[in-house]
Image (tube, helix red, strand yellow):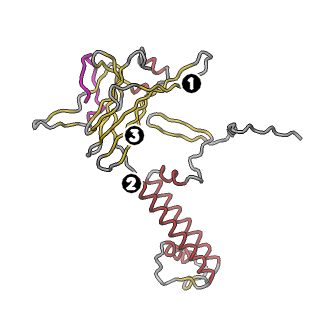
């Protein structure tokens, strides 16, 4: 009989050919993972928080119905354990289970035997735990701080102070103030080694200003394209062939919530406009007040080659 050679300690387990592929969407960039499960029974908390609100409501409904059907089946298996419940009528047992799980109890039906009392007591404990867990999850979902950062549809490359500069315009979409805002920009570039192996390298993009003490309106994040920049000497065609992707991550302090908020966006090579600049989005009204028109956040126009101030 042929013996299997032991797998070295720490070596990755082989991927099953039938392993499911999971799709992960990050902005305009789509990732696919094989061998990773979206739901891990050991981490239900993360799974419940990652659901959308309709999915969360559906999960709550399914769990609630499942628990009630389970306990209604236990009552139904022992006729006579519930007083005033019609024998063989599953709906009576189901609605009694609903009332017991919610710890309501209208007094019409009640446990009549030791078996009924034991099942009802178990259901009450389950109901209290279920209510506490779902209430906690609902509170966490409502209390999570969201950045509400708005991004221009395209990044642009234009002249600023006589130098080619990558620019990404973002805006504070909240009515309140964001403070101590920081931005980081990175580029993911597909490259080939001397041996012909393809890999993706991450480049940190040095910004002219990466921190803004107050972020009430808009902010144009700028990266000067010098010889150290991954964009140096590139045009639109070269970017497409290089499998170029741009990432921007923003962190800020929400003054109203007194909490840190985070957001990120991805730009593909096709989302970078060469020789274009952003149209003005901030103006001064007749009373001397600053007005930011966020509807113009993504408007771009041909670059005339003259320098202009960041909004």
Residue depicted at x 30% and y 34% = 212
Q: Which mark is residue 199?
A: 1
Q: Nearer the viewer, residue 165 or 239?
A: 165
Q: CA distance from mark 1 to mark 2?
A: 40 Å
- Mark positioned earlier in the residue sequence (3 or 2): 2
Q: Quadrant of the C terminus?
A: top left
* Residue 209 versus residue 177 in the image, above or below: above
Region rendered in magenta: 296-311
Q: Quadrant of residue 235?
A: top left
Residue 194 is inside the magenta segment: no
Position in image of residue 34 (x %, y %):
61, 39
Relative horizontal placement of residue 159, taking residue 22 as reference (left or right): left
Q: Which mark is residue 143?
A: 2
Give the prevailing secondary structure in the magenta stretch. Answer: loop
The residue tagged with tag 3: helix, strand or loop?
strand
Position in image of residue 79 (x %, y %):
63, 81
Residue depicted at x 47% and y 55% = 56
Q: CA distance from mark 3 to mark 2?
A: 16 Å
Q: Quadrant of residue 74?
A: bottom right
Q: Residue furthest left?
A: 287
Position in image of residue 302 (x %, y %):
28, 20
- Mark positioned earlier in the residue sequence (1 or 2): 2
- Mark positioned earlier in the residue sequence (3 or 1): 1
**Residue at the disc numbered 3:** 263
Q: Residue furthest right?
A: 1
Q: Quadrant of residue 173?
A: top left
Crowding at dot 1, Cα within 10 Å, few <14 / some 14-19 / many 20+, comes out as: few
Badge 3 vs badge 1, beta-carbon distance below 8 Å: no
């Amino acid at each position: 009989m042929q013996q299997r050679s032991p797998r070295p300690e720490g070596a990755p387990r082989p991927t099953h050919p039938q392993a499911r592929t999971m799709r992960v969407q990050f902005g305009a960039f789509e990732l696919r993972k094989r061998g990773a499960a979206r739901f891990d029974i050991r981490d239900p908390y993360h799974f419940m928080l990652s659901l959308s609100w309709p999915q969360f409501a559906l999960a709550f409904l399914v769990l609630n119905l499942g628990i009630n059907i389970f306990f209604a089946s236990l009552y139904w298996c022992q006729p006579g354990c519930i007083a005033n419940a019609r024998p063989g009528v599953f709906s009576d047992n189901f609605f009694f289970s609903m009332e017991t799980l919610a710890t309501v109890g209208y007094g019409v039906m009640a446990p009549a035997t030791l078996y009924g009392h034991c099942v009802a007591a178990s259901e009450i404990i389950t109901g209290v735990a279920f209510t506490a867990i779902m209430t906690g999850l609902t509170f966490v979902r409502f209390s999570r701080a969201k950045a509400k950062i708005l991004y221009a549809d395209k990044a642009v490359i234009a002249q600023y102070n006589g130098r080619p500069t990558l620019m990404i315009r973002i805006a504070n979409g909240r009515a309140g103030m964001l403070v101590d805002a920081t931005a980081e920009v990175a580029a993911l570039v597909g490259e080939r080694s001397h041996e012909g192996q393809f890999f993706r390298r991450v480049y940190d993009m040095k910004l002219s200003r990466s921190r803004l003490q107050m972020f009430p309106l808009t902010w144009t994040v700028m990266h000067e394209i010098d010889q150290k920049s991954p964009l140096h000497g590139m045009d639109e065609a070269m970017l497409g062939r290089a499998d170029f992707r741009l990432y921007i991550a923003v962190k800020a302090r929400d003054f109203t919530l007194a909490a840190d908020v985070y957001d990120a966006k991805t730009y593909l090579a096709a989302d970078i406009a060469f020789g274009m600049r952003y149209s003005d989005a901030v103006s001064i009204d007749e009373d001397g007040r600053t007005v930011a028109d966020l509807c113009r956040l993504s408007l771009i126009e041909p670059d005339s080659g003259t320098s202009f101030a960041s909004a």
